[in-house]
Image: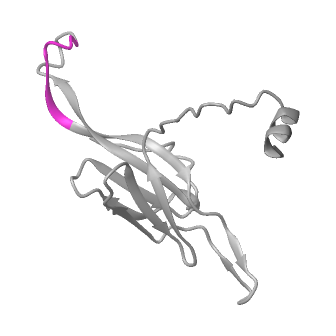
Amino acid sequence: MLQSFGNIDNYTDADVISAVQFEEKGKFLATGDRGGRVVLFKQEAVAVPDDPNESSDVDQKAPAATEWIPTYQFQSHHAEFDYLKSVEIEEKINQIKFVRSAGSMQLISANEKTIKLWRVGPRSFRRYRQLNVTSKSEFIKRSYQ
């Protein structure tokens, strides 16, 4: 099965993949391209019908293949200019590496000059309780007592 990301007819030089890394367990795949983008794919089982002529009921399908589903995409690096060396640094990602962590998944992306650590996964927001101060003037009064 051929999988493609985006339109393969109108690709540019920035769309060419320059780095690939599998996660330790093999469930995730990270790719980096010459445009500085990182795309994280997740492996998922795909149900394939036994007979192509039969109807596509979910009950009649058996998991027989896997697909790499794009899960996250973000811009990791941008083109920069190194003023000390008078050289333009392209955004091309040279290396991607998954990092072990106790909580969320982390990965490192690097171009010629910069290394970045990314935490990837669902974000949880923590709601903090408000102070017992109702106005700014009351806060100032309590501070000076």
Would you place residue 58 above or below residue 41 in this image? above
Q: Specify how the rendered protein is coloured.
A: one colour
What residue sits 47% from the left and 65% below the top?
A: 109
Count of numbered circles in the view: 0
Judging depth in this view, the residue of 7 and 137 nearest the camera is 137
Kindly indicate the quadrant of the structure image that contains residue 55: top left
Q: Quadrant of residue 13?
A: bottom right
Q: Nearer the viewer, residue 111 or 120?
A: 120
- Horizontal arrangement in the rendering, residue 6 relative to residue 20 (left or right): right
Residue 114: x and y, percent?
A: 56, 73
Q: Which residues are magenta?
A: 56-65
The image quarter containing residue 5 is top left
Answer with left or right where residue 55 lies relative to residue 99: left
> Residue at 78% of width from left, 27% of height from top?
134
Residue furthest to the front = 145
Magenta-drawn stretch contains 26: no
Placement of 82 over or under 52, stated as above or below: below
Q: Which residue occupies the foreground of this view, 53 or 58?
A: 58
Residue 125, position in %: x, y?
52, 35
Q: Is residue 141 above or below residue 48?
A: below
Q: Position of residue 117 (x, y in %)?
A: 48, 63
Residue lying at 33% horizontally and 57% vertically, measured from the top left: 101
Q: Which image quarter is the N terminus in?
A: top left
Give 111 or 56, whichever is nearer the viewer: 111
In which quadrant is the C terminus drawn?
top right
- Residue 16, position in %: x, y? 49, 60
Outermost residue to the bottom:
85
